[in-house]
Every structure is written in C-alpha cells, then in structure tokens.
Amino acid sequence: MSALQAVSASSGAAGHSIEFRNVSIRFNSFDAVSGVSLRIQPGEFVCLIGPSGCGKSTLLSAAAGFLGTRGDAPGAVEGEVLVNGERVRGPDISRGVVFQSSEALFPWRTVRENVAFGPRIRGVRGGELRDLIDYYIALVGLDHAADRFPSQLSGGMRQRVQLARVLANQPRVILMDEPLGALDAQTRSVMQREIERLWQETQCTMVFVTHDLDEAIKLGDRVVTMTAGPGAGIKSIYDIKLERPRDETTPAAIELHRALRDDVAEEVLKTLRSQRR
Ligand SMILES: Nc1ncnc2c1ncn2[C@@H]1O[C@H](COP(=O)(O)OP(=O)(O)OP(=O)(O)O)[C@@H](O)[C@H]1O
Ligand SMILES: [Mg+2]
C-alpha cells in the first residue's frame, strides 16, 4: 500500500455518534438553550437552522467542548453531551470545527504550514507528514496554492484551507458554523458540493449550521430547526430523503423549503415580538 493509499484508508474511518441528552446551557443568568435532546447517528449529516441568536453556535460549541467544561470556559452546561458514547469534557482533535470566517487560519503561515499544524502536534513527521499534507491539500483542490499565504487566497480558497486543516486531523466529527456564509452564491454552490464529497469520502459525522434553507436541504440527511431563545429548543426535525446530489428546484425540495421557511419565520416573529416588549 502506498503512503497516499494509507492516508486515504485511515481517513475513511467511520464517524462518531453525537448525543445531546436534555441539555440546557446558561451564560450567567441567561438561559440560552433549554432541554435539547437529539441523537445524531455515526456518519450522519445534520443541518441546524433557526433565528439569529437562538443558540445554534452554542450547541455546536457544547459538542466541540468549548463550554462549561473547564473553570475558564464560558457557559454552564446541564444534561449530557456525548460523542461516541463518551461525555465531552473539552476540545479534542477527533472533533474538528470550521468557523464562518477564515480568521481561524494563521495569516503568517502558508497553506501547507496551516494544514501541517494539527498533524505536527500529533507527532507526525518527515515523509509521512508530507504525504498527509499533500493528500488533504489535493483533496480540497489547492495543490497549486500550497505555498501561498492566506492573504493571497480568495474567500472560497481560504475556506478550503480551513477544511483541509480540519480534515488533516482525521476527525470523526466535523462541526461547521456557517462555513460558507461569507461566500458569493457561485462559490458557495461549488463548496456545498465539495463538502458533500468530502463528507462521503471521509464518512465522518457532520453538524452544519446555516441560515440558508436550500443549503440545508441540499446537504442534510436531517434538518433540525430551533425555536427562538431564551431557553431555545428543537422546534422540528425533517428527514430529507431526496437523492444526492440534490437539486433545490425540484417540487419536493421546494415543498421542504416552504415548510422550513414557515418554521423559521414563526420563530423570528416571536423574537421580534419579545424584543418589542
Ligand atoms: N459567551 C457568551 N456569553 C454570554 N452570552 C452568550 C455567549 N455565547 C452566546 N451567548 C448568548 O446565547 C444566545 C445564543 O447565541 P448563539 O451564538 O448560540 O446564537 P446563534 O443561533 O448561533 O446565532 P447566529 O445565527 O446569529 O449566529 C444569544 O442570546 C447570545 O447572546
Ligand atoms: Mg451562530
């Protein structure tokens, strides 16, 4: 087996399950999320939508291990957040996080060095490190830009670097917080396909936060909508059985779009009314 095949085979490890068991999250006296229970299957692609400020990023942060787990971490998490059946006690390399902005990249490091960062911390060195980096840079289609700095890349390319950087850690779970929010419509559509392809290739579990209903319908095995906060919870869950790659212009997709739009609109209205009080 060649080094590349070895990298490819090891990246095909199955995703981990994620389970929220009656999870409530508080920031000081503010109840952000209340009583959320949701089980995400290994390898499943779940999209999370809901009004701004309802708690989508908060739930993602809880799964990432950024909240309430250490003395200095913000938020108090009640209930249980389990990944692969084990309680989340802090961040772990097996759970990758992709943020909306590419500020998460090191601006003073090239694409190659950004992608090498995680594997190097894991102790990967020499030829093995080179093969691993080359593999993931090629996977996101950035071979030609490997030696450029983030400032020399377009927004879409920077998001690809973020993806490659997360994938190079061979995570079992990828948590994406509006990863395509800052991109133009065309680049976004290309990146949606890329993310779908990378998910299928790596078989990891995906949780993907978005405000774009069509994006959720294109990508999700399930789409979960949230109620408006404070004390936000799950409003509805849609099983998306459409064949992949999906076309958002089919009648079934349009029907789903309407249902999701109505659910989210109802919650946005609630937020606006409560703000007027
Ligand atoms: N570290 C924090 N300290 C205090 N309050 C916080 C903190 N993080 C989030 N919140 C509050 O929790 C609520 C949920 O925030 P969150 O960022 O999860 O919303 P969101 O659904 O991701 O919104 P958006 O769609 O705008 O990104 C908000 O009212 C927010 O102000
Ligand atoms: Mg958010």
Image (cartoon, rainbow, N blue to C red):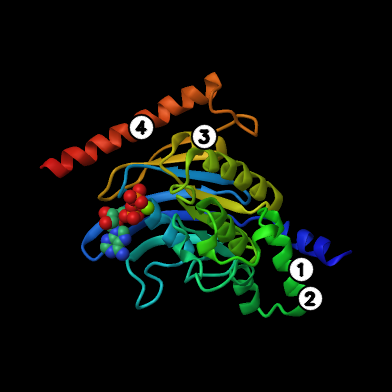
Residue of label 3: 217
Q: Is mark 2 within 8 Å of ligand 2?
A: no
Taking 266 as reference, is 7 above or below it?
below
Q: Which mark is residue 263?
A: 4
Q: Which mark is residue 131?
A: 1
Q: CA distance from mark 2 to mark 1?
A: 6 Å
Q: Amino acid at mark 2?
A: Gly
Q: Give the x, y percent position of residue 156.
A: 54, 51
Q: Secondary structure at mark 1?
A: helix
Q: Which mark is residue 16?
A: none
Going by the image, does 3 lie left or right of 191?
right
Q: Amino acid at mark 3?
A: Ile
- Which is nearer the N-term, disc 2 or disc 4? 2
Q: Which mark is residue 127?
A: 2
Q: Is mark 3 within 8 Å of ligand 1?
A: no
Along the line of sight, the residue nearer the viewer: 146 or 19: 146
Taking 74 as reference, is 100 above or below it?
above
Furthest residue to the left?
277
Which residue lies at the image location 16% right of the left edge and 44% below the top edge?
A: 275
Crowd around label 2: few <14 · some 14–19 · many ≥20 (10 Å): few
Q: CA distance from mark 2 to mark 3?
A: 41 Å
Q: Amino acid at mark 1?
A: Asp
